[in-house]
Amino acid sequence: MDKKLFVISGSSGVGKGTVISNFLKRNPDFMLSISCTTRKMRVGEVDGVNYFFLTQEDFTTCIENNKFLEWAEFAGNYYGTKKKYIFECLEKGKNIILEIDTKGALQLKEKMPEAVLIFICPPSLEVLENRLRGRKTEDENTIKKRLDEVREELKRAENFDYKLVNDDLDTAVIRLEEIIKGELNAQR
Ligand code: ADP
Ligand code: 5GP
């Protein structure tokens, strides 16, 4: 299969969503995978747009029925990528971006070794924490849980294909574009 699956991971608050949304504005032909999650909807989020918001029971049923390509628990909630959507996009020859956590990314790489794993790093841990707090979407307890994940995420990132630093936003978006276009050109 062609290399058309680009997986983007990085610690909470590093700027994954921001970098990806800027990338997609410049590259509207890429599909963004919509994940399922059990976490509460944030203000402004829309079911079926940002995520498919599931109850724990529905999520467990999807696991039991083998509906997920990958899934993981992250900071107390469950997140997963449905197989159906990804395979439909691949059949249509679409390039897909998945924004998933590092555990899910490594699971996916085992199943689909052609997937390209890209890890977004913060300029420093201090900047990461400031961005996560500055977003004002999580309470203190949730922020702590998310920061507790950082060390293990950085270890898992050692197995990724690429790392890029999100310091200046435009530079990070251009670097992501270079990585993706380089991979697509390499397979031609
Ligand atoms: P993630 O999706 O990784 O959790 P977000 O995209 O929500 O992170 O970004 C977290 C916060 O950091 C947001 O308030 C966003 O506006 C800000 N941010 C993202 N990238 C940058 C950057 N390069 N410089 C400064 N602030 C940034
Ligand atoms: P958030 O709650 O901030 O939207 O996401 C928290 C974490 O879950 C992020 O690291 C995000 O990349 C990850 N995530 C989102 N969707 C999925 C998914 O489908 N699978 C996995 N494994 N992680 C996901």
Image (cartoon, rainbow, N blue to C red):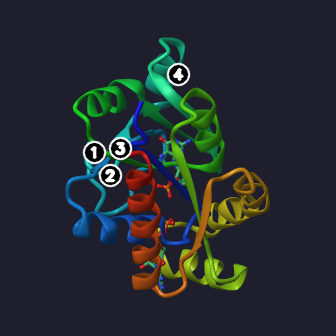
Residue depth check, mark 2 versus mark 3: number of the one nearer the observer: 3
**Which of the two discs, 3 and 4, sits closer to the camera?**
3
- Pair 4/2: label in front: 2
Label 1 element class: loop
In this rendering, the label closer to the viewer, 3 or 1: 3
Distance Cα–Cα, label 3 vs label 1: 14 Å
Give the distance between the C-alpha atoms of the residues marked 1 and 2, in whole angstroms: 6 Å
Q: Quadrant of residue 183?
A: bottom left
Residue 138 in the image: x percent, y percent?
53, 66
| Mark 1 touches mark 2? (CB < 8 Å) | yes
Residue annotated with mark 3:
33
Q: Which residue position holds label 1?
A: 47
Mark 2 lies on residue: 50
Q: Going from the N terminus, do you reach mark 3 or mark 1 first?
A: 3
Asked if the beta carbon under badge 3 is closer than 8 A to the nearest atom of ligand 2, the reply is yes
Horizontal side, residue 8 vs residue 17: left or right: right
Of labels 2 and 3, earlier in sequence is 3
Q: Which mark is residue 60?
A: 4
Three-letter amino acid code of the residue under disc 4: Thr
Q: Give percent across and percent down for residue 168.
A: 48, 87
**Residue 135: image location, x then y, percent:** 47, 76
Element type at mark 4: helix
Q: Earlier in the sequence, mark 3 or mark 4?
A: 3
Residues packed near mark 2 inside 10 Å, few (<14), some (14 to 19) or many (20 plus):
some
